[in-house]
């Protein structure tokens, strides 16, 4: 279902947000190179084989996107639906292998990548932390969420051209940081037909306004400490948090925040899964977002394609219940669509 199935005013707003977001993503590209694919080569650290490795975005270390793809060996099926699965902070694509195997066993082509400065894209243990601090200092990159979203758009170029994948049936999901990547990739690229962000969707502006930013900040504290020192503050406060988001992810706490980017995914099926007691993604901070999304999906006459579940008593943790709900959502909408 295309944006044309949404009322004109709503669709125009979503397209405007998407265009502006794409401009933001492209604003810090040193140089874009054509997409190319290299056969996987064995690596020694970690000792995994990734296949294939598309290269794009820019020359240099982070221009290479290692991809792990699992599928059943069945020559009878020419094209299958695909699900892109995204890891959380300080993990890698191989960490998702059990989930990939589960999706592959259900007939999907299961795909995982290393996000920026993770897995094969991290040459040392503090690469991600250092990249965040460098982004604050120089303003030249966007390693928190946005640069990996750019990669996921280019990944879609590759996946949609594969002969064994149905290009209209590609879904995306992820946990925590991966949930944020899935959320923003779906908002940026309508080719992701179904989205299930897990413990990732949150209200960044709401957290600042309501003094609920502490848990999120603690997850990448070094960059906020660097900003605090540079701004001459005795402690991290809301002003420091706002300054960091504006610098390393411009628009994250305003025009691209959840109340605007989440409804833009309509009318495509969207399931948001969070923990009811998650301090990084407070349920209270998503009331406006959910209200707007419900309204947009209702106007498009596809109310059944948006759902928000906050699992009671659960903090910042992906549970078996969430995994099951996500796979059922893909079975319901991705295969049927």
Image (spheres, rainbow, N blue to C red):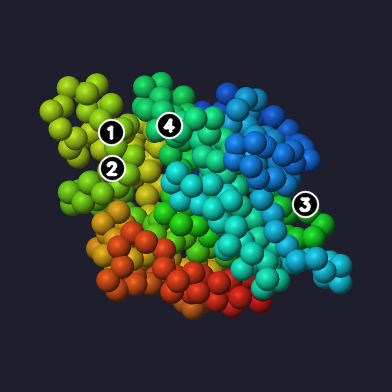
| N-term-proximal mark, 4 vs 1 | 4
Crowding near the residue tagged with mark 4, few <14, some 14–19, many ≥20 C-alpha atoms within 10 Å:
few
User: Disc 3 or disc 2, which is closer to the eye?
Assistant: 2
| N-term-proximal mark, 3 vs 4 | 4
User: What residue is disc 2 on?
Assistant: 217
The percent coordinates of residue 188 (x first, y second) are: 54, 49
- Where is residue 100, by image quadrant? bottom right
Q: CA distance from mark 4 to mark 2?
A: 17 Å
Q: Identify the residue at image location x=28%, y=33%.
A: 224
User: What residue is disc 3 on?
Assistant: 161
User: Which numbered disc covers residue 170?
Assistant: none
Tell me the element at label 3.
Answer: loop
Q: Identify the residue at image location x=30%, y=63%.
A: 315
User: What residue is disc 4 on?
Assistant: 126
Q: Are marks 3 and 2 in contact (CB under 8 Å)?
A: no
Tell me the element at label 2.
Answer: helix
Task: Indicate whether 62 appears above or below 278.
Answer: above
User: Disc 3 or disc 4, which is closer to the eye?
Assistant: 4
């Amino acid at each position: 279902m295309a944006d044309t199935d949404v009322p004109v005013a709503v669709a125009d707003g979503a397209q405007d947000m998407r265009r502006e977001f794409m401009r933001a993503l492209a604003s810090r590209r040193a140089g874009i190179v054509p997409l190319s694919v290299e056969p996987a080569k064995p690596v020694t650290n970690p000792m995994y084989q990734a296949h294939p490795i598309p290269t794009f975005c820019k020359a240099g270390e982070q221009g290479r996107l290692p991809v792990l793809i699992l599928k059943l060996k069945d020559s009878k099926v020419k094209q299958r639906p695909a699900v892109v699965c995204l890891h959380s902070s300080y993990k890698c694509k191989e960490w998702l292998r059990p989930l990939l195997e589960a999706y592959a066993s259900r007939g999907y082509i299961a795909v995982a990548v290393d996000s920026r400065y993770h897995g094969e894209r991290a040459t040392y243990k503090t690469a991600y932390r250092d990249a965040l601090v460098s982004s604050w200092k120089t303003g030249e990159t966007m390693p928190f969420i946005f640069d990996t979203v750019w990669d996921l758009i280019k990944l879609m170029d590759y996946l949609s051209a594969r002969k064994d994948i149905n290009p209209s049936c590609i879904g995306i999901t992820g946990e925590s940081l991966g949930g944020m990547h899935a959320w923003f990739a779906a908002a940026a690229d309508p080719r992701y037909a179904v989205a299930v962000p897990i413990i990732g969707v949150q209200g960044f502006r709401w957290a600042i306004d309501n003094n609920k930013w502490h848990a999120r900040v603690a997850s990448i504290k070094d960059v906020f400490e660097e900003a605090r020192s540079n701004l001459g503050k005795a402690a991290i406060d809301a002003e420091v948090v706002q300054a960091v988001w504006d610098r390393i992810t411009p628009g994250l706490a305003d025009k691209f925040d959840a109340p605007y980017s989440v409804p833009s995914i309509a009318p495509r099926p969207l399931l948001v899964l969070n923990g009811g007691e998650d301090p990084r993604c407070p349920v209270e901070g998503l009331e406006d977002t959910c209200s707007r999304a419900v309204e947009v999906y209702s106007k498009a006459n596809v109310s059944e394609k948006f759902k928000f579940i906050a699992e009671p008593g659960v903090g910042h943790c992906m549970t078996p219940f969430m995994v099951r709900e996500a796979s059922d959502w893909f079975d319901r909408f991705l295969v049927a669509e």
